[in-house]
Every structure is written in C-alpha cells, then in structure tokens.
C-alpha cells in the first residue's frame, strides 16, 4: 500500500524519540509498575510502542481489540458497523484532510466510504503530502502549514455560511478536484478562491 516504504523509514526514528521522551523524562518512574521496560525498549514501530507502553499504562487490553486503545480513540472505532454508527452520530461539520502517502497514519484508517456516508464529515485526500506536511516549495519552511490551514479556513467559512450544513450542495463535496471551495460555498461565505500557490496539486 501507498506509504508502506515511508513508514518503514520513519517509524524507527520516531519510536526512538518516543522512548527517549517517556523513559528519559521525569515521569519515567510512573511506568515501572504497569509497563515492561524491556518490551518498550524492543519496539521499533509506533503501534508496537503503543502496545508496550500506552495500553498497559492506561488499562487497555490491546491496541486493536474491541474496546482497545485505537478503538477508543477513533471516531469510527474499529471500522465495523458499531464504529460507523458512532461516526454517523457526528453532527458538527468536520473536515478531514489526509495524504495517501502519510508515513505515520495509514490512509485506510480514514475509512473513505464511511466518511462519505456520515453526512457531516468531509474527507479530502491527496495522493501525496506526507504527515501534516503538503510542502509548497523545495523549502517546506517557506509556507509551513499554509496548505492545510487555508483549506480548513475555507471549510469553516463554508460550513458557517450554509445552514443547515450540507456536505453536498448539489454540486458535489465542498471542495472540487482543484482543491477549490465549491462556488456555492464560496459565494455564500464571500471568500475568494485560494491563491494558486496554496492549491498546487500534490498528486
């Protein structure tokens, strides 16, 4: 799947930093009673780290079981019927922006079909962009998080301007294929299209 290579590259160093943070900080002694330090030190992925430290410390049986850590923390639970029902109960307009090559959070976890049916959840996926990145130049620090910030602001304006909120105003989702807010939303919010530099295709 897209992003697997990036995850193999990034998970070990990120997991190392997590181990340094949790085991090298002042609160490390709090872990000793509930966690196996050797198991934590042996982890090389974030999921393994969550299993070895986060779950036992917070009383979860596992990361992926029913009622487990990821189930509890996810808007759609484990991605089953029970989870979809939970997601469908979201009544606040919610914008989800995710890159398919995210090296940290697999795109499949966004549950595109469930988002589409949820009613108040809009998912915009890009082919690339990394993890909360979407660089718009060769120097990512030039624009930092401008790509996602601009889209989020347009979404908020559109959501406030179209009451009751509707994901589909008769012209498709809020954003079109060029990452421009749909005309109906743009007109209602009195907000012009994003600057071309902010909507460069990541694909």
Image (spheres, rainbow, N blue to C red):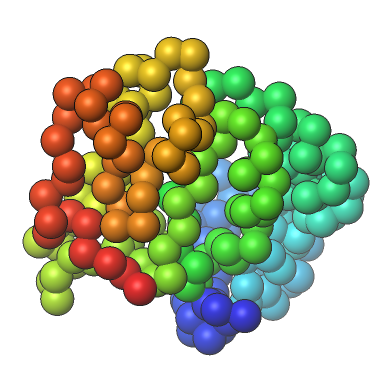
Identify the image quadrant of the N terminus. Answer: bottom right
107 relative position to 69: left or right: left
Identify the image quadrant of the C terminus. Answer: bottom left
18 relative position to 68: left or right: left
Residue nearer the viewer, 134 or 46: 134
Q: Is residue 103 above or below residue 171?
A: below
For the view shown, which residue lies furthest in the front direction?
170
Asked whether residue 95 appears in the rendered view, the answer is no
19 relative position to 148: left or right: right
For the view shown, which residue lies furthest in the top direction?
163
Residue nearer the viewer, 181 or 93: 181
Quarter of the figure with residue 45 = bottom right
Q: Position of residue 27 (x, y in %)?
A: 56, 44
Look at 57% across and 29% down and name the residue there. 120
Q: Position of residue 134 (x, y in %)?
A: 30, 63
Q: Is residue 31 above or below residue 184?
A: below
137 relative position to 96: left or right: left
Look at 13% across and 56% down and name the residue there. 196
Residue nearer the viewer, 62 or 160: 160
Q: Position of residue 200 (x, y in %)?
A: 21, 64
Number of marks in picture: 0
Asked whether residue 201 appears in the rendered view, the answer is yes
Residue nearer the viewer, 161 or 33: 161
Q: Position of residue 165 (x, y in %)?
A: 48, 20
């Amino acid at each position: 799947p897209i992003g697997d290579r990036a995850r193999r590259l990034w998970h070990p160093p990120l997991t190392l930093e997590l181990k340094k943070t949790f085991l090298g900080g002042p609160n490390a002694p709090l872990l000793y009673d509930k966690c196996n330090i050797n198991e934590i030190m042996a982890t090389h992925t974030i999921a393994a780290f969550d299993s070895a430290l986060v779950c036992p410390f917070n009383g979860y049986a596992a990361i992926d079981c029913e009622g487990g850590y990821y189930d509890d923390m996810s808007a759609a639970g484990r991605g089953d019927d029970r989870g979809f029902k939970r997601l469908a109960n979201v009544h606040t307009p919610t914008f989800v922006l995710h890159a398919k090559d995210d090296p940290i959070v697999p795109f499949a976890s966004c549950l595109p079909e469930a988002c589409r049916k949820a009613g108040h959840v809009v998912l915009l996926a890009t082919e690339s962009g990394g993890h909360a990145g979407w660089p718009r130049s060769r120097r990512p620090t030039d624009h930092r998080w401008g790509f996602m910030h601009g889209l989020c602001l347009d979404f908020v304006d559109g959501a406030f301007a179209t009451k009751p909120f509707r994901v589909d105003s008769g012209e498709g989702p809020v954003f079109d294929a060029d990452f421009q807010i749909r005309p109906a939303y743009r007109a209602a919010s009195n907000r012009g299209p994003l600057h071309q530099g902010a909507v460069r295709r990541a694909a």
